[in-house]
Amino acid sequence: MGKLTARHFIFFIIAAISTSLVNYTSLFIKIGGRDTWIFTIISGIIFFFVTSFIFSVISKIEYYDFKETCYIVLGKPLGNIYILIFSLTLVLMCIESASVSSSSINVNIFAQSPIWYCLLFFIITVFLIGKNRFNSILIICIVCVSIVLAINLLLALLNIRYIDYTLLLPIFKDRRISEYILCALTQLGSLSSLAIVLPILPRIDDKKNLKKISINTILLTSIFCALCVVILISTLGSLRSANVFYPQFVQTQRIYFGGFVENGNVFVMISSTLSWVVKYLITIFSLYTIWKDRVKYKRNFIALISVIVYAFSYLAAKNAYTLFILLRYYQYILLIVLFICPIIIYTLAYFKRQKFKYLK
């Protein structure tokens, strides 16, 4: 069985947390307007403290198997129901990765290419990578996340000259309180994608460093997400950012650098595609980890999921308007299944910590 270190785990956390919030920011700006950045910070703070609590509990009980933790805390019948719902949510996350990646390319780069064609390239790529051993997936994730971070840093530096912070003001003017609450909740739902890494925890070798490294990475990634939202609104404005599907592509069209770089669309396409590939790989591997005791052939399992994902992704992504409506409801599903439920599970685990010590 392939292993990974707590430092390798950093790349999994970054990909899980940031991919959705960074790539379809317009979904959240549509709800929160120019004040979205404030609620990105607020939701990031809430998320940081909640995940700090969860990792503290995991470290305290020293029990890293997520599936078994659910069985111990909830009991076998209720635990099976939650694991099934959790698994279906992971399938939805695979559909999100495939559909948003293909839709963004279709809308912004290859408008003449049919969506099924873009999807085919994505699904075949992730299938060929996903069927391999864990070490191959780990290497791909590390390389891709490193490239994505480098591209985002480069784009941030190139966008500095176009930033106008007056576009962030005035605050709390053009939205109702209910919309602000929904903006924070949808962003919490997006951030809660971190839960896809929970089934992978047993593979980590140096678990004594897991809590510290994970909490620090979550904090830095939350700050990164907030900065992305701030830079987007302060370059495009909230109205423009909310009314395009993938505002990063529009944002980088203004970039000009010394006659060498005339726009950053290619950079955004590479960053976006690699981000979704990594998130898909982590998700599909977590799904396989949960059910590996019942799956005889990994290749067949990955192939079956790929076919299901392709079919539903095509239905979701063939119309970008429909896709973004679905994505909004999808955030609420994530909020309940991957945020609220893990809080309940690990709170109960904390009170049952003596039982975990006995089982260990």
Image (cartoon, rainbow, N blue to C red):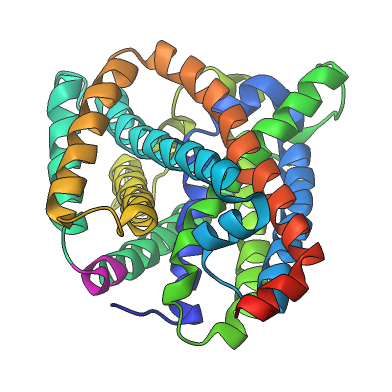
Number of disc labels: 0
Q: Is residue 21 left or right of residue 93?
A: right
Residue 136 percent across, percent down from the top left: 21, 70
Residue 227 percent across, percent down from the top left: 64, 51
Q: Is residue 234 visible?
A: no
Residue 137 percent across, percent down from the top left: 26, 65
- Asked if 124 appears above or below 211 in the picture, the reply is above
On-image quarter of the C terminus: bottom right
Looking at the picture, tell me which residue is in the foreground, 257 or 176: 176
Q: Is residue 96 left or right of residue 359?
A: left
The image quarter in which residue 273 lies: top left
Q: Is residue 140 left or right of residue 258?
A: left
The residue under the point 26% across, 69% down is 134
The residue under the point 31% across, 70% down is 138
On-image quarter of the N terminus: bottom left
The image quarter in which residue 178 lies: top right
Q: Is residue 34 visible?
A: yes
The residue under the point 26% across, 32% down is 309
Q: What predominant SS class does the magenta segment belong to?
A: helix
Q: Please say whether residue 149 is one of the residues in the magenta stretch.
A: no
Looking at the picture, tell me which residue is in the foreground, 271 or 61: 61
Residue 16 percent across, percent down from the top left: 48, 53
- Span colored in magenta: 133-138
The image quarter in which residue 91 lies: top left
Q: Is residue 273 left or right of residue 215?
A: left
The residue under the point 33% across, 48% down is 280
Looking at the picture, tell me which residue is in the foreground, 270 or 81: 81
